[in-house]
Image (tube, grey):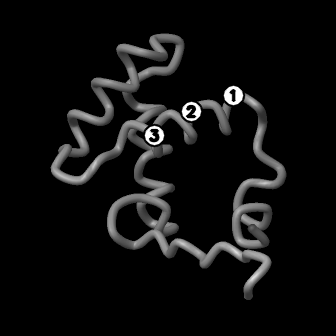
Amino acid sequence: MDRLVGDYGRATVKELELRSTIVYTAQPGRSNEEVVRLVHHVKPHFSEAQIEAARRDLDEKGYLGNTIEIPRTLTATN
């Protein structure tokens, strides 16, 4: 969580909207071009260039694909 806040704590609502849609849309086996097209179809108010730049940013920071580290969930037994 600290990493997300560090990376996107000052992002605008529109920037977060775009990035959350990209993360939701990017699935294993889906090409980068397909992700851009799908996001543009759902969010046409973003240009394909904006979408690709945000997708690249997320990828470089490790938020897409197999590079995402999923933290353990704390339970009452931990």
Give, as a three-letter code, the residue at label 2: Leu
User: Does 50 sit above or below residue 8?
Assistant: above
Q: Which residue is mark 2?
A: 18
**Which residue is rendered at x = 38% and y = 37% of the image?**
25
Percent across and percent down for residue 73 are 65, 73
Front residue of 66 and 75: 75
Q: Which residue is mark 1?
A: 14
Crowding at mark 1 (Cα within 10 Å: few <14, some 14-19, many 20+): few
Measure the alpha-carbon separation of dots 1 and 3. Answer: 15 Å
Crowding at mark 2 (Cα within 10 Å: few <14, some 14-19, many 20+): many
Tally of numbered tags: 3
Percent across and percent down for residue 12 are 78, 36
Front residue of 25 and 78: 78
- Residue 2 occupies quadrant: bottom right
Give, as a three-letter code, the residue at label 3: Tyr
Give, as a three-letter code, the residue at label 1: Lys
Q: Is residue 24 left or right of residue 20?
A: left
Disc 1, disc 3: CB below 8 Å?
Answer: no
Measure the alpha-carbon separation of dots 3 and 2. Answer: 10 Å
Percent across and percent down for residue 20 are 57, 39
User: Does 18 sit above or below residue 5?
Assistant: above
Which mark identifies residue 51? Answer: none
User: Does 10 sit above or below residue 24?
Assistant: below
Which mark identifies residue 24? Answer: 3
Q: Nearer the viewer, mark 3 or mark 2?
A: 3
**Of label 3 and label 2, which has the lower sequence position?**
2
Disc 3, disc 2: CB below 8 Å?
Answer: no
Front residue of 27 and 75: 75
